[in-house]
Amino acid sequence: MHYHIHAIDPKAHLFAVTLTIEAAQAQQVLYLPAWLPGSYMIRDFAKNLIDIQVQDANQQPLALTQLDKQTWRVNNDAGQIQLTYQVYAWDLSVRTAHLDTTHGFFNGSCVFLAAKGLEETPHSVTIAAPALSELADWKVATSMTRTAGDQFGFGEFSAPNYDDLIDHPVEMGDLTIDTFIAAGVPHDVVLSGKHRCNMARLCQDLKAICEYQISLFGTPAPFARYVFMTTVLGNGFGGLEHKASTALMCSRGDLPTASDLNAPVEKGYRTYLSLCSHEYFHSWNVKRIKPAEFTPFDLSQEAYTQQLWAYEGITSYYDDFITYRSGCVEQSQYLTMLSEIATRVYRGKGRFKQSLNDSSFNAWTKFYKQDENAANAIVSYYTKGSLFALFLDLTLRTESQGQYSLDDVMRQLWQDYGLTGKGTDVTSHQRIVEGLLNRNCDDIFTYLSNTDDLPLADLFAKVGIKMELRSSKGSTDQGGAGVEGDKIGFGARTKAEGFGLRVLTVSQGSPAHQAGLSAGDLLIAADNLQVNAQFEQQLQSYSVGAVIKLHWFRRDELMQGELRVTEAVKDTVSLSISDAELSKLWLL
């Protein structure tokens, strides 16, 4: 199986692919995945394939029959066949493919057709340089095994099977590249796009994070080389894990620019480091320790599991925590980060309607296809899953007087599942925790199937942390200590427009809901005065119990309602240290 991929027309966003199968089966079936691991939504990558042609070893055309939206059959005898096709690449994300004159990127799952029955045979790839002379300085970054060509140059690559082939995304362009060594393993840091990043600072911090994670699970690392690939944009965020690399997107302002290697970590950079930490942690937790439902993956249709809370939630707990434990962010910064995660959970009414198990199972539709009512209907297995991981960690630390922690659970998962290839089931994590605590832990794991708030305040108190719920200070208040919230609540997120405020979401039971506002409405007046971006601040001057007349447009119809002035709900989390000595049980 050999693929040749070429950025044939970056201006039209087209890759050209040639697939040569030396020993094709008779009536060979070919298919393209419908989704890719780590992004749990049907993507229908085949919709971007154009002009598929096939011929035999004598260059005679063969008939191609499409069987469904992503599967084809070649009417051939056994022997060599060659397919050619183009891929339209204009999705600027970490999931599919994007190509223009600034860079090229692709995941193998959306450009490489698979040959049914031949998935376990060796696969090779030629990544050819674009023909445009102005792109002569382009380089290539990928964690795929290189067999020919200079490092970061176009050339030949190999993979032992199809699953491996599509687990090494490719970035090409005028790349900025640096390398650091963590636990004896080279790690390449690749940036695509305009930036002023201090690469020495970035490598310094990533090295600390990577060495901490490798130490947590134990050497050797599960890869011989690792690649961080980031597309830098004016405004962007995203990441997707792979077995020896990660594809990331960040905003230009999130990268460190100060020349001082010890300059304070700004919030944007803190967020980017957590993103890198998150995807790197996945190298163990989901790429190798994985649910039984994902061993192996069926990429033709949805693969349902109740365990995403363990793979995204636990990873989301560790991503921020490790930026602190590795020394990249300060203790107060970490508590703010955790406060923000908890706030996102406590502000959602959907946490009372959907359990973590159900959130995991319904990722394919309810989480990945969210609408304006999502906060009222669902809970995130990332954020509440992170709080459940925190709950597990604090429970283990306090009940064992510091002898055990969630670290021990992860190490045991690595030994029992990651190194053996066996998939976890819905009881695997509970069995390990019960073994450490030497007791039945139904009281802990029942929070996966119910919709109760986790009893975190008491656990925090046992490790010297004070957890408080306060009201929000407005749309920019994401949580944390040292802020006095508003006394009057509104209950809707809005965006200022040229004339009024566009309603984005409405919280069920809130004053905005009771007044009749809905997502999409254009609020134009309150108390017979035009509203603007300061509307929520202006509400603070009213007394509780007052009634304010509102006017808004829904589509082209003028509507009105009454907003009853109500005390703001306490849905914003504040964490602070109450006992520094006691906090060492957790914040080592």
Image (cartoon, rainbow, N blue to C red):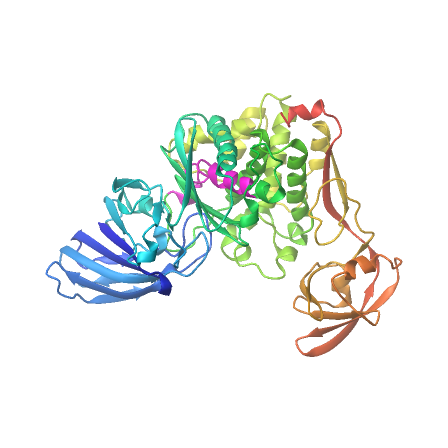
Q: Can you give x and y, in whole percent of width and height, for residue 341 in the image?
A: 64, 44
The one nearer the camera, 90 or 486, is 90
Residue 302 occupies quadrant: bottom left
Residue at figure coordinates x 44%, y 37% from the top left = 283
Q: Residue furthest bottom?
A: 557
Q: Can you give x and y, in whole percent of width and height, for residue 513 in the image?
A: 74, 63
Q: Residue furthest left?
A: 58
Q: Can you give x and y, in whole percent of width and height, for residue 430 in the image?
A: 54, 33
Q: Indicate whether residue 281 is drawn in magenta.
A: yes
Q: Quadrant of the C terminus?
A: top right
In the rendered picture of this protein, how many numbered marks are placed on residues?
A: 0
Q: Can you give x and y, in whole percent of width and height, for residue 206 in the image?
A: 50, 35
Residue at figure coordinates x 68%, y 43% from the top left = 453
Q: Which residues are magenta?
A: 272-295
Where 540 falls versus 455 (above or below)? Answer: below
In screen coordinates, is 35 left or right of 151?
Answer: right
Q: Indicate whether residue 355 is drawn in magenta.
A: no
Residue at figure coordinates x 59%, y 45% from the top left = 268
Tell me, yes or no, if residue 257 can be seen here.
Answer: yes
Where 377 falls versus 470 (above or below)? Answer: below
Tell me, yes or no, if residue 32 can be seen here.
Answer: no
The one nearer the camera, 450 or 235, is 235
Where 315 falls versus 352 (above or below)? Answer: above
Residue at figure coordinates x 44%, y 30% from the top left = 414
In screen coordinates, is 350 left or right of 91?
Answer: right
Residue 152 occupies quadrant: top left
Residue 55 occupies quadrant: bottom left
The one nearer the camera, 437 or 235, is 235
